[in-house]
Amino acid sequence: KILILDFGSQYTQLIGRRVRELGVYCEIHPFDWTEAQIRNFSPRGIILSGGPRTVTADFTPRAPQVAFELGVPVLGICYGMQTMAAQLGGRVEPALKREFGYAQVKIRGHSRLLEGIEDHTTPDGEALLDVWMSHGDRVVEVPPGFKVICLTEDAPIAGMADEARRFYGLQFHPEVTHTRQGQRILGRFVHDICGCEPVWTPENIIEESVRNIRRQVGKDKVLLALSGGVDSSVVAALMHKAIGDQLTCVFVDTGLLRLHEGDQVMATLARHMGVKVIRVNAAERYFDALKGVTDPEEKRRIIGHLFIEIFEEEAKKLEDVKWLAQGTIYPDVIESAAARTAKASLIKSHHNVAGLPETMRLKLIEPLRELFKDEVRKIGLELGLPYEMVYRHPFPGPGLGVRILGEVKPEYAEILRLADDIFISELRKHELYDQVSQAFAVFLPIKSVGVMGDERSYDYVIALRAVETTDFMTARWAQLPYEFLDTVSRRIINEVKGISRVVYDVSGKPPATIEWE
Ligand code: XMP
């Protein structure tokens, strides 16, 4: 396994995902992990991430010395290379020019890391790589034992290697896809140089998780709040494979779900896979609780609380449940660790903390805690969940409750469900669904005038929203084809009673958010 020490780069998670994609297990930990923790982890190799700070100032992060003393290969990326250079006796200076974006690096000499990897060859036989750079400082002198392995115009030392100790540094970012050969370079490091076998596959992940779950819970009973989203569905399938009927899921139909969503969850997990699922039809309770409430945060609070209330009621009916399973995934774990130590300069706020009360006195089991989202999806498929479920766009916890602006009423939810379903099924039909990151309809409780046939209509408005994003922190509105929007708009106005107008949202995030509330 590989240890990634995090210096706070926005790309650190990406390094982790890339290494996992290479079939090698890795974990991300803060750069000041203790010597004992690192030795205990016993990595086959270490990657030092990039970071926003500068090694030319005092009191900025340094790699733990033990990283260079374990006798395992070390790869420093960007800040990681700079701190490696500074700590091992080289020199780093602030660059006169910041390099940001595409660059071509020339490969120099022979290094195990870059041997035979190239994008172009110049007429004089020089190998070139197209890479992604993002740095202010640069290494101006390599430490003793190192040689330069690649360079650019602006960075005469864009990569360095000490083959004897198997220490490597790269100024560019192999983990981003803009570095075209990045995955090969990382593969060279983890497979060939560190000697890690590509055994971290969906089948193996499942097998190992099943073993761990069985060992952890023994004969105890486990409870899971099933939302129908990817993470909780995969937890359900995985736990069911491990412990069968010891698992009970509670699925609360809030009345704020998408069209047929509740039935689909039941059909897939309960009927098809045989998972024990208790479905609670709570739509009426939700609409009652939301009556007259218009403030978005207040709606969120009510929906959240009611969920906990209902879940507890159901849990009380069950006997001797000892465990609560949750679909926490690795990015949540890393982010909350980062938030605790405030090391990453980019911190996401969580909408998804389930907040199930401690009064339930259940032990927590989180079988996806070590997995990235793409791994969760892959094991979901492997466990037999349908592709559409596993690759579904994210859906907010409060559901349609925050997509019906202002007061939530059952008749609005009915209208919105139908309009949303038309939008989504047309996206699928036109093969646009997987090209956007999230798409949905929003119900606007304002009336506008129209003509339908010979009659004047006076009905509500639907807004369509589709965005492209990788991190959901920033997003662009999706430039869907006009003919496509035309089709959707016509269908919604013709088929959904109560709607006389459809608009398309062309706001980016920031300044707008993805959801309307
Ligand atoms: P915003 O609207 O903040 O959305 O740009 C970013 C992502 O978060 C989702 N979202 C939520 N998810 N509970 C959730 O579980 C919420 O209250 C919530 N609000 C927004 C949103 O769908 C998008 O994917």
Image: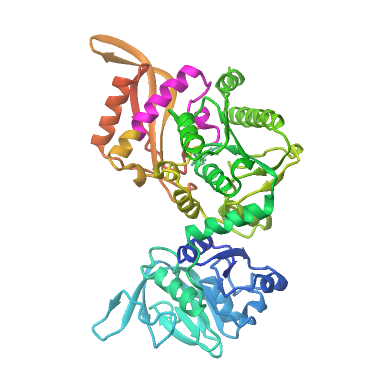
Query: What x and y, as percent, mark residue 137?
Result: 51, 73
Indicate the quadrant where residue 425 lies: top left
Identify which residue, 284 or 467, lies in the foreground. 284
Position above or below: 458 against 382: above
- Tell me if residue 405 is in the magenta stretch: yes
Using the rendered image of the protein, determine whether residue 52 is visible from the camera's viewpoint. no
Identify which residue, 72 or 98, lies in the foreground. 72
Over which residues does the magenta segment extend?
A: 397-424
Q: Residue at x 28, y 76 (%)?
A: 120
| View extreme (top): residue | 455
Q: Residue at x 72, y 34 (%)?
A: 319
Position above or below: 164 against 308: below
- Tell me if residue 182 is in the magenta stretch: no
Q: Residue at x 55, y 22 (%)?
A: 283
**Total number of numbered discs in the rendering:** 0
Indicate the quadrant where residue 103 lies: bottom left
Position above or below: 411 against 213: above
